């Protein structure tokens, strides 16, 4: 009778935090990466399944940080060119990136931009021109072209006319760059407080923040949810508490929790008002 092959001893719990850190940094983890952590081939599928259970996405031959979270992290830093997503996002295909952009645009979670000859995307908090402002600029561009085509005598524009138009455009953009808790943010904060009451764990009297955030992610970007949580705290409608030990949270849960003092993560919420 053939002897059964023994699986080498491997302490997954000891190595998992380092692998999770590598996944969060690289955004993709594949069998070749697991071999660097000395994961036996017989256990690689088990390890990848553990990551999927932690909230990461399975891809052929590995796992990845969810594409939506990758994109939201990018857009928190700056607008990005649509054509560069293949280099900036990891673990997806061109078709997946296009579908993601279409989905987020239809849900009004991103804005599409024209930057020179290229198309770009940005988050909803970025100041942009509205349709009326773009029409006004279009009229200015038409006047410039008409002046340049003027024959036989050269023509130009009155500097004061151009200055007034540009100042009108710059005013709203400057105000938008420093939002003062707009009504839609207040509505989201109220919704989060209500949702926290619904998700309250009776034994603790608290709501787990990753559960609260995931309940709102289909409709709102992560950065916006964190802003609304901050507003609810400022209005004393919600209290956020840090996790007693960050090692108790998965990498995905850490990403979903807003940051507290000294690099803590605020993983528990307590509604300050009773549920009606």
Image: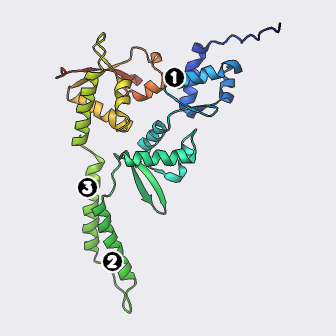
Tell me, yes or no, if residue 78 can be seen here: no
Sooner in the amino-acid sequence: mark 3 or mark 2: 2
Say above or below: 209 vs 167: above
Instruction: Check the image and report above or below for 232 versus 174.
Output: above
Residue neighbourhood size for the residue with mark 2, other residues' Cα within 10 Å, grouped as few (<14), some (14–19), many (≥20)? some
The residue at the point 26 percent across, 36 percent down is 188
Task: Say whether residue 149 is left or right of residue 205.
Answer: right
State which tag comes first along the sequence, 3 or 1: 1
* Residue positioned most to the bottom: 152
Secondary structure found at label 3: helix
In the rendered structure, the answer to whether residue 7 lies left or right of residue 22 reads: right
Q: Look at the numbered discs 1 and 2 and tell me whether their residues touch, using CB distance below 8 Å.
A: no
Whichever of callouts 1 and 2 sits on the residue coming sooner in the sequence is: 1
Q: Nearer the viewer, mark 3 or mark 1?
A: 1
**Label 3: few (<14), some (14–19) or many (≥20) C-alpha neighbours in 10 Å:** some
Can you give x and y, in whole percent of width and height, for residue 60 in the image? 62, 34
| Label annotation for residue 143 | 2
**Which residue in the rendered view is the most extreme toward the left?**
276
Label 1: state its secondary structure. helix
Q: Which residue is mark 3?
A: 172
> How many C-alpha atoms fall within 10 Å of the one at disc 1: few (<14), some, or many (≥20)?
few
Can residue 216 be spotted in the picture?
A: yes
Q: Nearer the viewer, residue 202 or 117?
A: 202
Residue at the extreme right: 1
Residue 44 image offset from top left, x and y in percent: 65, 22
Label 1, label 2: how far apart the Cα atoms are: 60 Å
Q: Residue at x 34, y 70 (%)?
A: 138
Say which residue label 1 marks. 53
- Residue 18 sits above or below residue 65 on the image: above
Instruction: Name the quadrant of the C terminus.
Output: top left
């Amino acid at each position: 009778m053939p002897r059964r092959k023994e699986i080498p001893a491997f302490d997954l719990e000891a190595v998992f935090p380092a692998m999770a850190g590598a996944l969060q940094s690289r955004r993709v983890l594949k069998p070749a990466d697991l071999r660097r952590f000395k994961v036996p081939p017989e256990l690689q599928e088990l390890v990848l399944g553990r990551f999927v259970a932690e909230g990461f996405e399975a891809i052929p031959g590995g796992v990845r940080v969810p594409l939506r979270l990758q994109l939201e992290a990018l857009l928190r830093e700056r607008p990005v060119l649509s054509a560069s997503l293949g280099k900036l996002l990891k673990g997806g295909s061109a078709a997946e990136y296009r579908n993601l952009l279409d989905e987020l645009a239809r849900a009004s979670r991103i804005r599409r931009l024209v930057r020179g000859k290229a198309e770009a995307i940005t988050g909803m908090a970025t100041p942009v021109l509205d349709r009326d402002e773009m029409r006004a600029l279009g009229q200015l561009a038409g006047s410039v072209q008409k002046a340049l085509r003027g024959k036989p005598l050269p023509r130009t524009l009155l500097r004061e006319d151009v200055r007034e138009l540009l100042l009108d455009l710059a005013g709203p953009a400057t105000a938008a760059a420093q939002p003062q808790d707009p009504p839609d943010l207040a509505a989201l904060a109220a919704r989060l407080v209500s949702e926290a009451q619904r998700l309250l764990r009776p034994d603790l009297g608290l709501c787990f923040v990753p559960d609260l955030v995931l309940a709102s992610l289909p409709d709102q970007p992560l950065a916006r949810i964190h802003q609304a949580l901050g507003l609810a705290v400022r209005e004393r409608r919600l209290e956020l508490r840090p996790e007693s030990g960050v090692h108790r949270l998965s990498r995905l849960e850490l990403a979903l929790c807003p940051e507290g003092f000294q690099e803590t993560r605020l993983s528990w919420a307590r509604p300050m008002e009773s549920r009606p």
